[in-house]
Structures are given as structure tokens and as C-alpha cells.
Image (cartoon, rainbow, N blue to C red):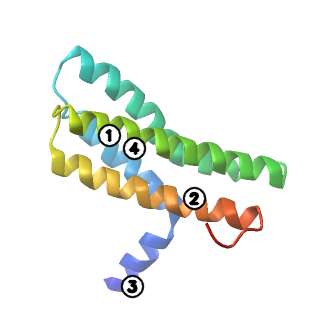
Amino acid sequence: MQNHNSKFKSDLKTRCYRFSLDLIAFIDTLPNQRSCYIIANQLLRSGTSVGANLFEATASSSKLEFKKYHEISLKSANETKYWLGLLRDSKKADKDKINGLLQEVTELANMIASGILKMKGKKDF
């Protein structure tokens, strides 16, 4: 089981896909309020964009295009952190669920950022 868990954590695309599914399930639990609807819409767009851009990168025609998709993915992850924080701090949703999603998107963002730095030839942050 631990071996499978380690493999799952190292597979960035799989984690992004799982994050998107978790995010969709979370959004479906939000209150039926105008503010939640608007934030949920933005959250769904940015959160699912993280993985979508990584998948799109695989069809890139150049290294520059490949790097650009990763940079867009990182920006989407950072935007997702903003929307999740806004929901948490406005007390519109379960804090523990949001914190779990925030932790995962932060880890994904760190992994993506590390990859971008490697593509740029930088080893340290």
C-alpha cells in the first residue's frame, strides 16, 4: 500500500486530476447563495485549469510552449489558493475541507514551480 501511495504522490498529472474531482465534489456542497455561486464558478475554472494545462503541455510543439503551459498551470494553482482562502475566511464552507484542498493545491503548485525552475536551468528557489 505504501508503495502505491508513493507512486500516486509522485504522479503530478494523476494528483491534479484527483484534485479536480475533489474540488468538484467540494463545490457541490457549497451553500446556494449568490456569493458562493460566483466564487465557485471562479474556483472551478482555476482549479481544473491546473491539471488541464499540464495535460495540454504534453501536446506542445516546442520546449517554450511546454514551459508556458506549466507556467499557466502554476498561475491557476495560485488563483485557486486565493478563491479557497476567500471561502474559508468568509466562513461559507467547512474549514477542514478547505484546508485539505489548500494543502493539496499548494503541494501541486510547489511541484509545478520546481519543474519550471528546472526547465529554466535553476536548481534552487
Tell me residue 5's x, y (percent): 36, 76
Density class for disc 2 (Cα within 10 Å; few <14, some 14-19, many ≥20) is: many
Check disc 2 and report its element: helix, strand or loop. Answer: helix
Residue, disc 4: 81
Query: What's under tag 3, amino acid-wise?
Result: Asn
Q: Is residue 125 above or below residue 38?
A: below
Tell me residue 9's x, y (percent): 43, 71
Q: Do we see residue 83 in this rendering?
A: yes
Q: Are marks 1 and 2 in contact (CB under 8 Å)?
A: no
Residue, disc 1: 84
Marks 1 and 3, Cα distance to the nearest angstrom? 31 Å
> What residue appears at the point 58 percent right and 46 percent down from the top-left corner?
73
Query: What's under tag 4, amino acid-wise?
Result: Lys
Query: What's under tag 2, amino acid-wise?
Result: Ile
Check disc 4 and report its element: helix, strand or loop. Answer: helix
Density class for disc 3 (Cα within 10 Å; few <14, some 14-19, many ≥20) is: few
Marks 1 and 2, Cα distance to the nearest angstrom? 19 Å
Residue, disc 3: 3
Q: Is residue 59 left or right of residue 99?
A: right
Q: Between label 2 and label 3, give the one nearer the viewer.
A: 2
Density class for disc 1 (Cα within 10 Å; few <14, some 14-19, many ≥20) is: many
> What residue appears at the point 43 percent right and 61 percent down from the top-left corner?
107
Q: Are marks 4 and 3 in contact (CB under 8 Å)?
A: no
Return the residue nearer the eye: 2 or 33: 33
> What residue appears at the point 17 percent right and 46 percent down from the top-left corner?
95
Residue, disc 2: 112
Is the N terminus in the top left, top right, bottom left or bottom right quadrant? bottom left
Q: Are marks 1 and 4 in contact (CB under 8 Å)?
A: yes
Q: Which of the two discs, 2 and 3, labels the residue nearer the N terminus?
A: 3
Is the C terminus in the top left, top right, bottom left or bottom right quadrant? bottom right
Check disc 1 and report its element: helix, strand or loop. Answer: helix
Q: Which of the two discs, 1 and 3, labels the residue nearer the N terminus?
A: 3
